[in-house]
Image: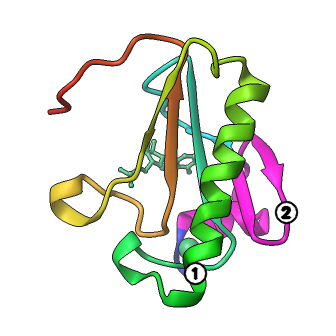
Amino acid sequence: MDCIFCKIISGEIPAEIIHRDDEIVAFRDINPEAPVHLLIVPVKHIETITDIDTEDQNLVGRMVFVAKQLCEQEGISESGFRMVLNCREHGGQEVYHLHIHVLGGRAMRWPPG
Ligand code: 5GP
Ligand code: ZN
């Protein structure tokens, strides 16, 4: 499949992988927008959050839990962070393989652009 995140999961494209289990992989964003910028992705190729099925609910919950654990590992739990999930055109999604961004290590602004 011609999907950059599937290729990172399979090892075809290198990335700094910081978590891997049967269902979820996490790695550092290639173009970080903050001192800590992680991407948490399901191994299963799901294009967007609008494409999840009933049986994917636990998977998405696990993605958030892994993100929370990685925040502890990265030392940004106390200072805080932002989790972002962009969906389709208006959400600014560029890679159509479901992912949660974790951004931290600096104060974020609100509202987003
Ligand atoms: P989106 O806009 O789809 O929510 O975010 C996609 C993210 O994937 C962007 O922040 C972008 O920098 C990151 N990204 C795109 N290609 C690669 C890649 O080949 N490797 C890594 N590590 N990150 C990537
Ligand atoms: Zn994919």
How dense is the environment of label 2, judged by Cα within 10 Å: few (below 14), some, or many (20 and up)?
few
Mark 2, residue position: 21
**Which residue is farthest bottom?**
54
- What separation in Å lies between label 2 and label 1 (alpha carbons)? 16 Å
If you read the primary sequence from the N terminus, does the residue marked by circle 2 or circle 1 appear first?
Answer: 2
Which is more toward the observer, 82 or 27?
82
Single out the mark in the foreground, 2 or 1: 1
Secondary element type, mark 1: helix
Q: Quadrant of ligand 2?
A: bottom right
Give the image location of residue 53, x and y in percent.
48, 88
In the image, residue 7 sits, relative to residue 15, either above or below, namely below
Which is more toward the observer, 84 or 35?
84
Give the image location of residue 68, x and y in percent.
66, 39
In the image, residue 7 sits, relative to residue 111, either above or below, namely below
Residue 94 in which image quadrant:
bottom left
Give the image location of residue 52, x and y in percent.
46, 81
- Residue 36's disc number: none
Identify which amino acid the numbered label 2 is placed on: Asp
Horizontally, is 81 left or right of 64 in the view? Answer: left
Mark 1, residue position: 56
In which quadrant of the rendered image does the C terminus lie? Answer: top left
Q: Residue at x 64, y 71 (%)?
A: 59
Secondary element type, mark 2: loop
In this figure, which colouring scheme has been used for the structure? rainbow
Q: Residue at x 43, y 26 (%)?
A: 33
Q: Residue at x 57, y 66 (%)?
A: 60
Identify which amino acid the numbered label 1 is placed on: Asp
